[in-house]
Image (cartoon, rainbow, N blue to C red):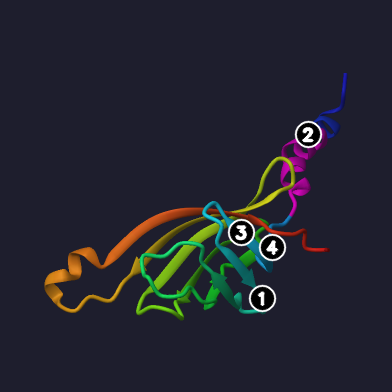
Amino acid sequence: MVPTTSLLLLLGLALLAPGLSAEKCVLTGLWINDLGSNMTIGAVNNNGEFTGTYHTAVTATTKEIKISPLRGNQHSSNQKSQPTFGFTVKWSFSDSTTVFTGQCFVDEHGKEILKTMWLLRSHVNSIDDDWKATRVGINTFTRLRKRWE
């Protein structure tokens, strides 16, 4: 018969092991979403703040698409391995702003994935048109290149 202490230790390790083996999802780097838009996120500082650029592949305007700045925050309490985050894109080619919120995941194959939801606010000329000024959507981002490449 196995001593109780050994059995409890073995059970505890079995329950904790999956959490210990999970890779940490890192926001910093190059990402592409399901629509072909590219995003570059710079280093996340000690306060969880980051900046970067967003190059959208889709737009409702007829203007030339330009790379646009983004600014955001990652929730980094307790050094979570799959953090939540949010960022704002100030579009360089229109009077619109988009806010994204999401979570950084590592799947069962070690692939990093950003699952996001966004709100895009477009400029309208009157309060009567406010009803059509905000759009909502979701995007899934995958790493464009490995972090070490």
Residue matched to label 2: 8
Question: Of circles 4 and 3, which is in front?
Answer: 3
Which residue is at a point 81% across and 30% down the rendered structure image? 7
Pointers 2 and 4 in contact (C-beta within 8 Å) = no
- The first of marks 1 and 4 along the sequence is 4
Residue drawn 54% across the image and 76% down it: 67
What residue would you read off at disc 3? 32
Q: CA distance from mark 1 to mark 4?
A: 11 Å
Give 21 or 41, whichever is nearer the viewer: 41
Residue at point 72% right, 46% down?
19
Type of residue at label 3?
Answer: Ile
Disc 1 versus disc 2: distance between alpha carbons? Answer: 44 Å
Which numbered disc, 4 or 3, marks the residue that appears first in the sequence?
Answer: 4
| Residue 32: % across, % down | 61, 59
Residue type, mark 4 in image: Val
Q: Label 2: state its secondary structure.
A: helix
User: Going by the image, does 12 lie left or right of 49?
Assistant: right
Is 91 included in the stretch rendered in magenta?
no
Predominant SS along the magenta part: helix
Q: Is residue 18 magenta?
A: yes
Label 1 SS: loop
* Residues shaded magenta: 8-23
* Neighbourhood count class around disc 2 (C-alpha, 10 Å): few under 14, some 14–19, many 20 upward: few
Identify the mark nearer the N-term, 1 or 2: 2
Quick check: marks 3 and 2 in contact, CB under 8 Å? no
**Which residue is tagged 1?**
42
The numbered mark at residue 26 is: 4
- The N terminus lies in quadrant: top right
Nearer the camera: disc 1 or disc 2: 1
Q: For mark 4, give the secondary structure.
A: loop
Q: Amino acid at mark 2?
A: Leu
